[in-house]
Image (cartoon, helix red, strand yellow):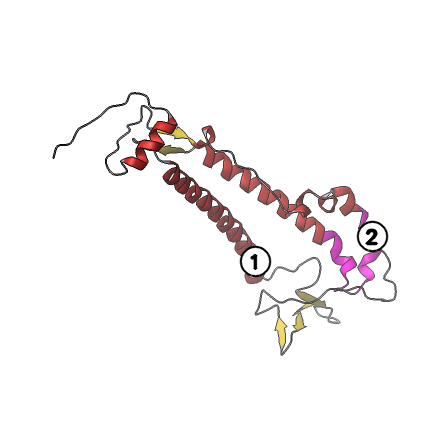
Amino acid sequence: CSNNTVSIHSPIEITFEKLSLQYPTTLSCPCTQSSIRHDQFLLLDLYYRPICTSQFVNQTFISSLYDDKMSDCYSLDYRIMAVSHFQLIALLCRTIKEMISDALEEFTTRKIVTNQVLSHSIFNAQIAALVEQLKSTIIANIKHINDFLLFNIVENRIYLGLRTNYFIQAVPRAPTNKFIPAKYKTLNSMCSCLTNNNCVHQAGIYNSTGCTGV
């Protein structure tokens, strides 16, 4: 039994695929170019949440929600929070878009390196793995920023402008006011913003005296 080596110069794709099926373990097809940039063979289509392309993140819409009389409302009235809520969403959308743009720019300039032609199945598997790694990296970076902001707010006890984490109590003849951590009722207990950074409470529209607006 003898082994014969047959050389085919500059085979077309169909020929290579056929031979790779017939001789999966012995076929060798060296590359004349060992590396190629991702953006030369890969195109990624981005789809953002509809909220990030809607009028709700438009500054004109956000400004229309502002009313200086809102300060008379109950602190958990959504009319007080609306402007900040949509400003935060707009900021989040811009930040994520910038992060994704930076990550894609770095990703597309990287190169895939191989000294042998890859079959369709192997090539697609490698690309799928690269894209999943890219998505995981972006998600991890977003979570890192979120955790960093929460850590600073909680550990430094930053007083939120919406007055939802602390209440200020004026003490007569005292040199300073007293900051009281907000507590919110949950199903079985009370959640304190002093010890828990995940306290959640349903906002609402309250019919308070002196509170007007949308």
**Residue lying furthest bottom:** 188
Q: Where is residue 53 in the image (x, y as percent from the top left)?
A: 68, 42
Q: Give the range drawn in magenta.
A: 64-84
Helix, strand or loop at label 2? It is: loop
The residue that label 2 is drawn on is 67
Along the line of sight, which residue is nearer the eye, 73 or 4?
4
Q: Where is residue 84 in the image (x, y as percent from the top left)?
A: 71, 53
Contact check, label 1 and label 2, Cβ < 8 Å: no
Q: What residue type is labelled 2?
A: Asp
Q: Position of residue 132 (x, y in %)?
A: 46, 46
Instruction: State which quarter of the image contains the N terminus.
Output: top left
The residue that label 1 is drawn on is 150
Precedes in sequence: disc 1 or disc 2? 2
Residue at x 74% of width, y 57% of height: 81
**Residue lying furthest top:** 9
Instruction: Using the rendered view, name the quadrant where residue 125 is placed.
Output: top left
From this view, report whether residue 179 is shown above or below residue 37: below
Q: Please indicate whether residue 2 sits to the left or right of residue 105 in the image.
A: left
